[in-house]
Each structure stands twice: as structure tokens, then as C-alpha cells.
Amino acid sequence: MIPIEILNAFGDNYIYVVEYGSEVCFAVDPGDAKPVEALISRRNIKLTHILATHHHADHIGGIGTLKKAFDCEIIGPDKQRISAIDTLARDGDDFDLGNMKVRCIATPGHTATGVCYFVTGKELEAPVLFTGDTLFVCGCGRLFECDGKTMFASLQKLAALPGETHIYPGHDYTEENLQFALTVEPGNETLKKKRKAVQQQNQHNRPTVPSTLAEEKTLNPFLKAKTWQEFANLRKQKDKF
Ligand SMILES: [Zn+2]
């Protein structure tokens, strides 16, 4: 099984590196080039592709440096705001990286043009979803460019993927998200257990990702919302939290 390397940047950003074939890898949302460069030089692998979920600097800040150093192909949405893009990621687009299949899912909400990447392949323990700032463990991204109805529809698209899918988000906001979720459902024992486990992970500087989609559907208040109005209301509460 291929492990997905989880790298940290800027305190709470996650960058992911996936070795998809013999000594070749792709990176997801490299906001900073340094941790990626350090990993690939340590592992002696070649960076061939970068997947970008959206245009925010903390997700793409390292792309220029990495493209220059490794001549890798940049895949992402929104060429206007991510000028380094070689291959545009449009909703429903599929591309192969080695034996892995990457499907692009448009998820407007946090930004108008953001996407998530759903990756499958026999080398992976389970399907993987790179969610950028759309879906976090027990939370979701802020609505910078779209309304609640749009984001709700995007999250519902993700919720329809297989429950065993591993969720790899762009930030570690897990503990704060759980605190908020517990204000929505104060009596939820599973949430309390999860918070305890996450607090321990944080104390030991261990990543709080991935989660699974099935778990998110049980614990994440934004995925549990039944209507876009309910979702939008929760999002407003979280903005003030
Ligand atoms: Zn963002």
C-alpha cells in the first residue's frame, strides 16, 4: 500500500505527497515548496505533477518554485488566478497518474472556482478525496465567493462518494471544529470521544487527518444539515464562533 505523506506548512496547512508509481510522485496544494523539496530529496523520488484545489496563496505559494525546479505539470482550476496551470481541472475531468485515476469535482463555495480531487487505484488502501478548503474534518470552509446554497450543493456532491473514502483536507482545524460541533450537538458521545482522541493527537503533534467520509457523515454538522438553509445558518454561527 502506498502511504500518503502528510506535510505541514504555516502551522495549520496540510500538503500531501503521493508516490503513484516507481519513484514518481504528485503533490497536492503545496503552499510552501520547502517541505515538499525536503521530502522528495530525502526519498529520492521525482515530482511530476501538482494538483491545486483553489487559488489561495497558502495552497499554491510553492508552485512556482517547484515547477521551476522539477518541471512538473500543474493541474488546477482557474487559470486566471493560478497562472502556472498547464492542465485545467474541470468538473468531471478524469486523468491517469500511473495506475491511479484522478477525478476532478467542482466544489464552488469557499471560492467560486475551487475543485476537489477524488483518487482511486489498487495501490491505495481506500479511495482518497483531497478536499482543499471545501470539507474539513468535522467542518467546512468559509464562504468567500459563493452563497450557502452553492456550498451546500458542493458538499452534497462529496457526500455521495463511497463512505470508505479517506478525506484529506487543506487545514488542520479539527479540534476547533469539534468544539463547534459540540455546541450544535452537546450530547453527542461520539463527538466527545473524537474530541478526546484529537486532543491527544495534537498534544503529540500527530496529524488529525485523514478521516473517512462515513465518519464525516456521522459527525460533521455541515454534512448533517438537511437543507441549504440549515447549512447556511450553521455556517453563520461558525463564522462567529
Ligand atoms: Zn482557501
Image: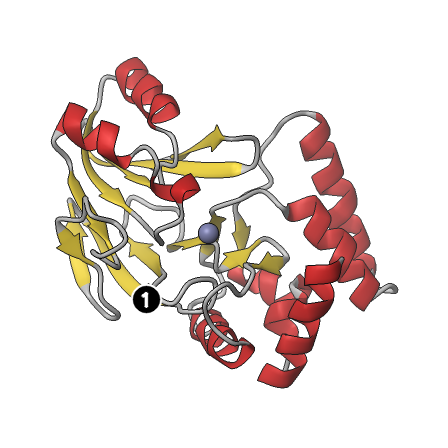
> Looking at the image, which is closer to me, 220 or 194?
220
> Looking at the image, which is closer to me, 228 or 207?
228
Query: In the orientation shown, which residue stands out farthest toward the right?
Result: 187
Image colouring? secondary structure
**Residue count near mark 1 (Cα–Cα under 10 Å), binned few <14, some 14–19, many ≥20:** many
Pointer 1: what residue? 105
Residue at 68 percent of width and 61 percent of height: 239
Residue at 65 percent of width and 47 percent of height: 174
Q: Quadrant of residue 162?
A: bottom left
Q: Quadrant of residue 73?
A: top left
Percent x, y of residue 6 = 45, 33
On screen, residue 185 above or below 80 = below
Q: Secondary structure at mark 1?
A: strand
Quarter of the image with the C terminus in it: bottom right
Percent x, y of residue 2 = 33, 36
On screen, residue 126 above or below 232 = above
> Looking at the image, which is closer to me, 194 or 51?
51
Percent x, y of residue 139 = 62, 58
Residue at 52 percent of width and 61 percent of height: 213
Percent x, y of residue 143 = 53, 65
> Looking at the image, which is closer to me, 65 or 162?
65
Q: Is residue 196 left or right of residue 155?
A: right
Q: Is residue 59 left or right of residue 159?
A: left
Amino acid on which the number 1 mark rests in the picture: Ile
Residue at 47 percent of width and 38 percent of height: 14
